[in-house]
Image (cartoon, rainbow, N blue to C red):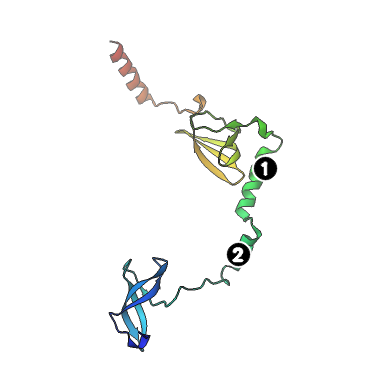
């Protein structure tokens, strides 16, 4: 069936940007004997008719493509520089293996099974630590050191004392 034989309501194959695939569409508008708009039978999306998958524009992404070809992005370079500055003058052999049940302190070197060597840069209350790795900064779960556990408020202290007195009595 040629495009000139088609009318509104006919079924055609068109590239759908929502589905990101060539799918079956229904023609919903025609101008000058050509298909103008189509509706995807898979996702229901309405868009202009695309006979084939659109080619990617190389002009718009030339700077990104050249950086990707180089292999290292600016973000990765900054993360690596920050990591090396934290490890400067320190020995990686003194690292502590990472475990969710372990206690870590600030500036401690850890060895993560997936991310490798890292330095604890901050402790986040409610059992988390921020660790700088060669690939970037990650937030990991752990047990907080006693010095980092927040002090309960006065109202909570009163409730605790009252509960203890009732339990003892």
Q: Which residue sits at x=70%, y=38%? A: 88
Rounded to the nearest whole Å, what is the CA distance between mark 1 and mark 2?
Answer: 27 Å
Residue at 35% across / 84% down in the picture? 1
Counting residues from the N terminus, which is met first, the one under dot 1 or under dot 2?
2
Q: SS at mark 2?
A: helix
- Tell me the residue that label 1 is attached to: 84
Q: Say which of 48 and 77 sits in front.
A: 48
Q: Is residue 144 above or below residue 117?
A: above
Residue 36 lies in what quarter of the image? bottom left
- Image point (34%, 17%), residue name: 161
What residue is pinned by disc 2? 65
Of 66 and 27, which appears nearest the observer? 27
Q: Residue furthest right?
A: 89
Query: For mark 2, does the 10 Å Cα neighbourhood hold few (<14), some (14 to 19), or many (20 or more) residues?
Result: few
Q: Position of residue 8 (x, y in %)?
A: 29, 82
Which residue is the extreme one toward the top?
Answer: 169
**Residue 166, image x, y percentages:** 28, 14
Which quadrant: the C terminus?
top left
User: Would you call the spot at circle 1 few (<14 residues within 10 Å), some (14-19), or many (20 or more)?
Assistant: some
Determine whether 105 is above or below 35 in the image.
above
At mark 1, the secondary structure is helix
Residue 120 location, x and y as percent?
58, 36
For the residues labelled 1 and 2, say whether their Cβ atoms are less than 8 Å apart.
no
Q: Nearer the viewer, residue 53 or 79?
A: 53
Side of 115 relative to 88 (left or right): left
- The one nearer the camera, 167 or 62, is 62
Q: Nearer the viewer, mark 1 or mark 2?
A: 2
Q: Toward which corner of the image does residue 85 lie, by quadrant?
A: top right
Residue at 57%, 42% in the rendered image: 115
Q: In the rendering, at what x and y percent does residue 33 appear?
A: 35, 88
């Amino acid at each position: 069936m040629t495009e000139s034989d088609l009318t509104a309501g006919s079924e055609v194959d068109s590239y759908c940007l929502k589905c990101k695939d060539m799918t079956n569409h229904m023609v919903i508008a025609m101008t000058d004997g050509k298909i103008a708009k189509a509706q995807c039978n898979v996702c229901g999306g309405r868009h202009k008719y695309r006979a084939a998958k659109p080619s990617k524009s190389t002009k718009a992404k030339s700077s990104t493509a050249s950086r990707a070809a180089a292999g290292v992005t600016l973000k990765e370079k900054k993360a690596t520089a920050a990591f090396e500055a934290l490890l400067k003058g320190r020995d990686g052999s003194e690292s502590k293996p990472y475990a969710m049940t372990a206690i870590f302190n600030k500036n401690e070197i850890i060895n993560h099974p997936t991310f490798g060597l890292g330095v604890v840069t901050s402790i986040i209350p409610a059992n988390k630590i921020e660790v700088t790795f060669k690939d970037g900064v990650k937030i990991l779960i752990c047990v907080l050191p006693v010095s980092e556990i927040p002090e309960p408020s006065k109202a909570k202290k009163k409730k605790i004392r009252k509960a203890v007195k009732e339990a003892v009595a």
